[in-house]
């Protein structure tokens, strides 16, 4: 899927070993940018964190409004953004929506930085 391979060697060879990384494909770059754009809002980062760290592994929308200090409609808007980005799943139970972190979503966010390499020491 990736379109190019680049060898990135530091200018000062004594600082670290040469790194070889594969450049991201245009499709992967779009996906990463979309996820980071959604996570560019601190409220969404907090909401995802609250869900991912909840003891049950899920959270009701009714339990998310207090910690972020926002109304239910506003939290619902943020949750839709997280859902559309594929970071959470939503399950309707009666009048309440319950959210779970999408399996692998946190790993995907962490691994998305894999295309960024270490900066050589100065």
Image (cartoon, grey):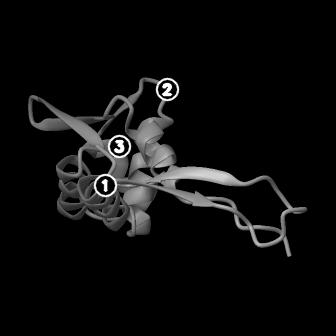
Q: Earlier in the sequence, mark 2 or mark 1?
A: 1
Closer mark to the observer between disc 2 and disc 1: 1
Image spot of residue 29 (x, y percent): 32, 60
Q: Secondary structure at mark 3?
A: helix
Q: Describe residue 93's horizontal placement relative to residue 8 as left or right.
A: left
Q: Which residue is mark 2?
A: 55
Q: Quadrant of the N terminus?
A: top left
Q: Describe residue 14's horizontal placement relative to residue 113 as left or right.
A: right
The answer to whether 122 is drawn above or below residue 98 in the figure is: below
Q: Which residue is mark 1?
A: 25
Q: Residue at x 39, y 69 (%)?
A: 40
Task: Residue 31: name its quadrant.
Answer: bottom left
Q: CA distance from mark 2 to mark 3?
A: 13 Å
Q: Secondary structure at mark 2?
A: loop
Closer mark to the observer between disc 1 and disc 3: 1
Closer mark to the observer between disc 2 and disc 3: 2
Residue nearer the viewer, 10 or 39:
10
Q: Residue at x 24, y 44 (%)?
A: 86
Judge the density around disc 2: few (<14), some (14-19), many (≥20) Cα neighbours within 10 Å. few
Q: Residue at x 49, y 44 (%)?
A: 111
């Amino acid at each position: 899927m990736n379109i190019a391979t680049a060898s990135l060697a530091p200018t000062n060879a004594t600082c670290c070993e040469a790194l070889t990384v594969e450049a991201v494909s245009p499709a992967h770059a779009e996906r990463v940018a979309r996820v980071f754009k959604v996570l560019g809002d601190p409220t969404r980062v907090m909401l995802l964190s609250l869900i991912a760290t909840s003891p049950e592994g899920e959270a009701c929308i009714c339990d998310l409004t207090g910690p972020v200090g926002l109304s239910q409609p506003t939290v619902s808007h943020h949750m839709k953004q997280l859902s559309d980005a594929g970071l959470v799943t939503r399950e309707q139970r009666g009048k309440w929506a319950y959210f779970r972190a999408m399996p692998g979503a946190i790993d995907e966010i962490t691994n998305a930085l894999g295309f960024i390499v270490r900066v050589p020491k100065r």
